[in-house]
Amino acid sequence: MAVRRIVTGHDANGRAIVVSDEGVEGHAIGALGASATFLWGRDDPGRFPDDGSPQPMAAAFPPPGGCAIAMITLAPTGDDFHEFVEHVLAPWADPDQPGMHRTATLDYDFVLDGTVGLELDDGVEVVLGPGDLVVQNGTRHRWHNRGTTVARYLSITVGAQNAVAGGAAPTT
């Protein structure tokens, strides 16, 4: 699903302008219909006025002070998103539990379509539907599609300090 992204900025006189208006395509994950659409992000805190140019990101998740937004589509069958986490997001993934991951971010995850399962440690799971919001405080988690149709959620991530590193569960 393409997302129309409009970016604003400032001209040389500090007046508001539209810098770009374009479609952003998702990147397919596996063959079952899952995808990730990176919409915007930056590693540094915003400072304005600016010209609205894309800012660099060194990794998939922003450091403290940075932010990002992406739309995630989960296929109604299979675990291709878990494979994506295991391989593409490996620095944040638990190698012993495919799909489980932890990031040093504060996430706002808003369900747009379908039925999404949010699994936390020890198999605790919350089932979410359209309009539900998760405030993810740097916790270890994994996403599931618990419905029979495609599920989508919008994820806004803000870089944070997290004393618990990596995707693996803490040992006791």
Image (cartoon, grey):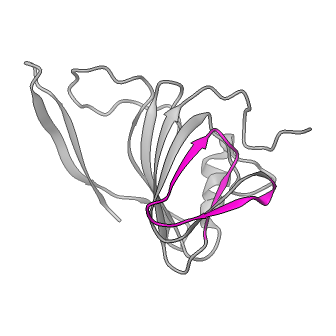
Q: How many marks?
A: 0
Q: Quadrant of the N terminus?
A: bottom left
Is residue 140 within the magenta segment? Answer: yes
Residue most extreme to the right: 172
- The residue lying at 68 percent from left, 53 percent from top is 86
Is residue 41 within the magenta segment? Answer: no
- The residue lying at 31 percent from left, 34 percent from top is 54
In the foreground, 129 or 141: 129
Q: Position of residue 135 (x, y in %)?
A: 55, 45
> Quadrant of the rendered structure where residue 80 is?
bottom right
- The residue lying at 53 percent from left, 42 percent from top is 107
Q: Is residue 102 left or right of residue 33?
A: right
Q: Is residue 24 above or below residue 171?
A: below
- The residue lying at 21 percent from left, 51 percent from top is 22
> Quadrant of the rendered structure where residue 130 is?
bottom left
Q: Position of residue 56 (x, y in %)?
A: 40, 30
Q: Is residue 9 left or right of residue 38?
A: left
Magenta span of residues: 122-145
Q: Position of residue 28 (x, y in %)?
A: 47, 63
In the foreground, 148 or 134: 134
Q: Position of residue 5 (x, y in %)?
A: 26, 49
Residue most extreme to the bottom: 148
Q: Is residue 96 left or right of residue 152?
A: right
Q: Quadrant of the C terminus?
A: top right
Q: Is residue 142 above or below residue 92?
A: below
